[in-house]
Amino acid sequence: MTVRSGPLTLPTLRGRLVTIIVSVALLMGVAVGTISAVALHSRLTAQLDAQLLQASERAGRRPPQFSTGDALPPPGARIPLGQAAGTISVYSDGSGLLDAGFVDANGDYQTLTSDQVAELFEVPRDGSVYTVSVAEIGSVRAVWASQPTGEETVTAIPRESVTRQVSSFVSFEVVIVVLAAGAAALVAWQLVSREVRPLDKVAQAATAISQRPLAEGDVSGLGQVDESVMTGTREVVAVGSAFNTMVAHVEKALSQRHRSETRLSQFVADASHELRTPLASVRGYAELLTRHDEGLPPDVADHLQRIHRQSQHMTSLVENLLLLARLDADPEVARQPVDATSVLMECIRDAHMAGRDHVWQLSVPDSPVVVLGDATRLTQIVSNILTNARVHTPAGTTVDVSLTQEDNHGVLTISDDGPGMDPDFAHRAFDRFARADTARSPSGSTGLGLAIVHALTQSLGGDISVQSSEAGTTFVLKLDAAPAPDSSHAEPVPPFDDGGDQPGVG
C-alpha cells in the first residue's frame, strides 16, 4: 500500500511493517529449510554408507553354487545372496577383471562397460567410502575392499534414492514456506492495521484541519484526535497527546491573531471613515485659498499648494484604506456577465489621456470577451494596473495590453518594458504597504495599489500574478468566462470620449 505525495510515491508504515515481518518469516523459513535439508541429506547419506559397507562385506562371501573349477563362471555368478537390487559389484584378482555388474530391479544382471569399470577402479584403496560419478548410472557411493578369498572388490550403491528423497523434501518445504509466508502476510496485515489504526485517526484529524480555511479566520473547533487513540501504545499516546496540545496552541494563537486582525481592520475602517470629513474640509479650504492667493507672499502661496497636494494624497490613501477594509469585511460580490473588452478599451483610453508620454498598445479579439464579475471592480483593477505601469516607469515606456479567451477563462495581460521590479520585491508585490526601493517606486507611493488589485481580483473569484525582470514587468489576470453578453445581460460600460486621441489598438 502506498500514498502519493506530489510526483513521488511513498510506502505506508503499514505496508513497510508487513513487508519486514513477511521478509523475516521467509528468511527464517529458508534458514530452517536449508538446515533441515542438509541434516536430512547427511542422515540419508550415512544410512546409505552403512548399507554400502554391509554390501561390501557380503561381496566377499561366495555363493553356494559358485565353484573354483577350471571353467570360467558366468557373469554375475560371484554376486552373493542378499545384495539389494542396483548394488554394483566389481571383482578383480589383482591382475585382471573377474566380474563387474549389478542386478537391476527386474532381477536381470547388467554387465558394466569397461569405461564404467575404469571409473570405479579410481576409488582409493583405503577402505573409505567415496562419491564417484559413473557414466549412464550417475553419482554413486563406492568403497574398495580386500576380501578373504584374495579377491579385490569395489562395491557401489547409486545415490539416486538420497537425491530423490532430499529433492522431495525441499519441494515440500518450499510449498510450506510459501504458504506460511502468505499466512504471515495476512495475519501481519491484520495485526499491524489494528496497531496503526490510531495513527490513521491522527492523520485524519490533521487532514481535516488542513482543509479548513484557516486563512479566512475559521479557527473555531479545529478538533482533536479521538479519545480511543489515547488508550493505545505508549508511542501512539505520545503522538496523540502532542498533536492535541499542538492543535490547542494553534487554535488559541490563530484566534488571537484573527481577533487582532479584526480589531485592526475595524479600526482602519473607522479611522478612515472619520478622517474623510476633516480631510475634505482641509482640501476644500486649501483649494479655496489657492484660488485667491493674489495678495499672498510667494512662499505662503507655495505652502498652500503643498497643503492642497498633500491633502489630495491623504484623501487617496484614506479612500484606499477604507476600500481594503470593506473588502476584508465583505469580500464576496454578486458576479454578472461583463464585457471585458469594453472595460479594457475604456481603461486604456483613460491611461492614454493621463500618460501621453508612454506608448500604449492594445490587442483584443474580434468578438467580445465576456467574464463573470462586476464592471466597477474590474475597471478599478485594470485602472490600477495601468496606473502602476504609468507611474512606475519612465517616459517612452511601451505598455502592451492584450485580452484573450483561453478555455473557460478570460485572460488579460499587461506588460511593460520598464526597469522591472526588484527580485526580492516581486514575490510580495501584492502585500499591503509593500514598496520597492527601485526606480519603479517614486516618492508618494502608498504601496496599496497592487494590494487593492489583489483584493478586488479575489472578490471576483479570479487570479492575478506578476513576473518581473530587467526586461520589464508583466501582470496576468484570469477571470471565469461567461456566455457572450447581449443588451439584457452584460453590464454596460459608460462611453468615454478622449477628445479624438486613441491608443494603438491591434
Image (tube, rainbow, N blue to C red):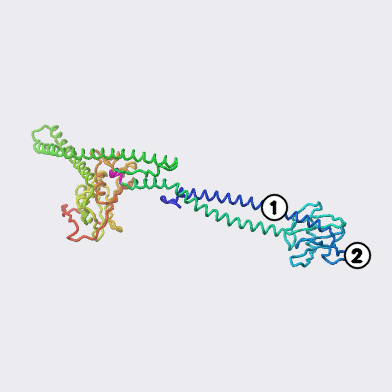
Q: Would residue 355 be counted in the magenta stretch?
A: no
Front residue of 207/151: it is: 151
Q: Position of residue 456 (x, y in %)?
A: 24, 48
Residue at 15% of width from left, 33% of height from top? Answer: 303
Give the magenta part as a residue range: 213-219
Where is mark 1, residue-wise?
A: 43
Q: Is residue 494 visible?
A: yes
- Quarter assignment of residue 109: bottom right
Tell me the number on the disc at residue 69. Answer: 2
Front residue of 221/466: it is: 221
Front residue of 447/72: it is: 72
Q: Is residue 14 left or right of residue 222?
A: right
Residue at 15% of width from left, 39% of height from top? Answer: 276
Q: Position of residue 74 (x, y in %)?
A: 84, 67
Q: Is residue 338 left or right of residue 177?
A: left
Q: Is residue 394 visible?
A: no
From the image, which quarter does the C terminus lie in?
Answer: bottom left
Residue at 74% of width from left, 67% of height from top? Answer: 106
What SS does tag 2 mark? loop
Q: Residues within 10 Å of mark 1 (few under 14, many from 20)?
A: few
Callout 1 amino acid: Arg
Q: Position of residue 418 (x, y in %)?
A: 29, 46
Q: Is residue 360 left or right of residue 162?
A: left
Front residue of 178/120: it is: 178
- Quarter assignment of residue 134: bottom right
Tell me the number on the disc at residue 443. Answer: none
